Amino acid sequence: MAVEGDWLVALKQDGGKGRHGRVWESIEGNFLGSTLVQVRPDDPPSPSLALAAGVALIEAVEMEAPGAALSLKWPNGLLLGDAKLAGLLRGGSGGRVGGGLG
């Protein structure tokens, strides 16, 4: 059973689903990873975790590419200029939230 802090990394994903049941397909060579967070009573509501993850992702990418034209497209896109660089998805049940980056 997965525990908080574990990461699941895949080389390829088949049958992915985006927001509103849209089809999502992986592209060879992209990073595909998910992690698990245990929501605690004094944590902010889980939907705000997507925004916090997006801000953290921008900060991490800026460390490797200072000055890059990065922005967040609400609710789940990391943009480099006008191009989507990454997507963040979250879902959960039973007091746990899983988040994915692809």
Image (cartoon, rainbow, N blue to C red):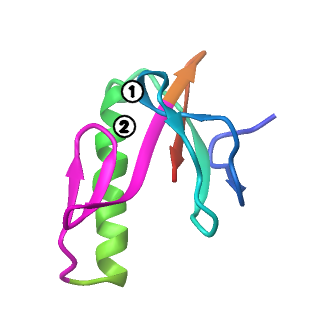
| SS for callout 2 | helix
Instruction: Kindly check if marks 2 and 1 are in contact, taking CB atoms under 8 A apart as contact.
Output: yes
Q: Where is residue 98 shown, x and y percent of the image?
A: 56, 35
Image position of 13 with respect to 95: above or below: below
Which residue, given by chain and number where applicable, does mark 2 sit on?
49
Magenta residues span 67-90
Residue 73, magenta (yes or no): yes
Amino acid type assigned to the residue bearing label 2 in the image: Leu
Main SS, magenta region, reads strand
Relative to 38, is 72 on the left or the right? left
Displayed quadrant of residue 65? bottom left
Q: Which residue is mark 1?
A: 46
Whether the magenta-drawn stretch holds residue 17 is answered as no
Q: Is residue 61 above or below residue 22?
A: below
Q: Residue 76: x, y in percent?
A: 34, 42
For the residue marked with disc 1, what is the amino acid? Ser
Q: Quadrant of the N terminus?
A: top right
Q: Give whichever of 36, 30 is nearer the camera.
A: 30
Label 2 crowding class (10 Å Cα cut-off): few <14, some 14-19, many 20+?
A: some
Indicate the position of residue 11 as horizontal and vertical percent values: 72, 60
Q: CA distance from mark 2 to mark 1?
A: 5 Å
- Local secondary structure at mark 1: loop
Residue located 32% across and 48% down the image:
77
Q: Is residue 51 left or right of residue 13?
A: left
Residue extending farthest right: 1
Q: Residue at x 34, y 27 (%)?
A: 47
Name the disc covering residue 100, or none. none
Task: Name the residue located 63 percent from the left edge and 41 percent from the top edge.
Answer: 4
Question: Residue 74 at x, y = what percent?
Answer: 23, 40
